[in-house]
Image: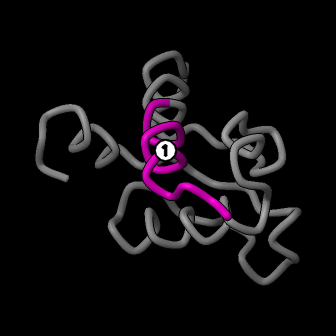
Amino acid sequence: MCDFEALHYALKEELLKIYKDAETPQPRVKISNLQSTKLCGLANLAKLILYFEREGYLTVVNKEENYKEWEVQIEPSVLDLVFGYG
C-alpha cells in the first residue's frame, strides 16, 4: 500500500528543487525520471501528478499518451507550496 502523504511530500520537494534549479521558467521532466517513483511506483505517482495538475502546480503535456511516457511541465504556481498558499 502506498503512503500518499509521504509521496506528496517527496514529489513536492522534488518539483520545487527542479523548478529552483531550472534555467527556464517552466521546466519539463519525464515522469519516469522522477525519484519519487521509487516510493510508490509509477501508477501511484501518476495519480498524484493528476492531483497536482488539478491544483495548477504542473501540466501534463502529453496526457493522451500512456502515463508511463508522460512529461510534466512545472508551472510557476508550484512556488505556492513554498509560500504556504497550497
Q: Is residue 40 above or below residue 46?
A: above
Q: Would you say the magenta stretch is mainly helix, strand or loop?
A: helix
Q: Nearer the viewer, residue 28 or 5?
A: 5
Q: Nearer the viewer, residue 41 or 52?
A: 41
Residue drawn 67% across the image and 64% down it: 1
Residue 7 magenta-drawn?
A: yes
Residue 78 magenta-drawn?
A: no
Residues shaded magenta: 1-13
The residue sitting at the front extreme is 1
Residue 7: where, in percent of width, then height? 54, 48
Residue 42: where, in percent of width, then height? 79, 59
Q: Nearer the viewer, residue 55 or 45?
A: 45
Label 1 CA crowd tier, 10 Å (few <14, some 14–19, many 20+): few
Judge from the rendering whether residue 59 lies leftward or rightward of residue 41; answer left or right. left
Count of numbered circles on the image: 1
Residue type of the residue flagged with mark 1? Ala
Q: How is the image coloured?
A: one colour
* Image quadrant assignment for residue 51: bottom left
Residue 11: where, in percent of width, then height? 53, 42
Residue 81: where, in percent of width, then height? 26, 41
Q: Secondary structure at mark 1?
A: helix
Residue drawn 54% across the image and 22% down it: 22
Q: What residue is shown with label 1?
A: 6
Residue drawn 42% across the image and 49% down it: 75
Q: Is residue 10 above or below residue 20?
A: below
Judge from the rendering whether residue 69 lies leftward or rightward of residue 29; answer left or right. right
Residue drawn 54% across the image and 72% down it: 50
* Image quadrant assignment for residue 78: top left
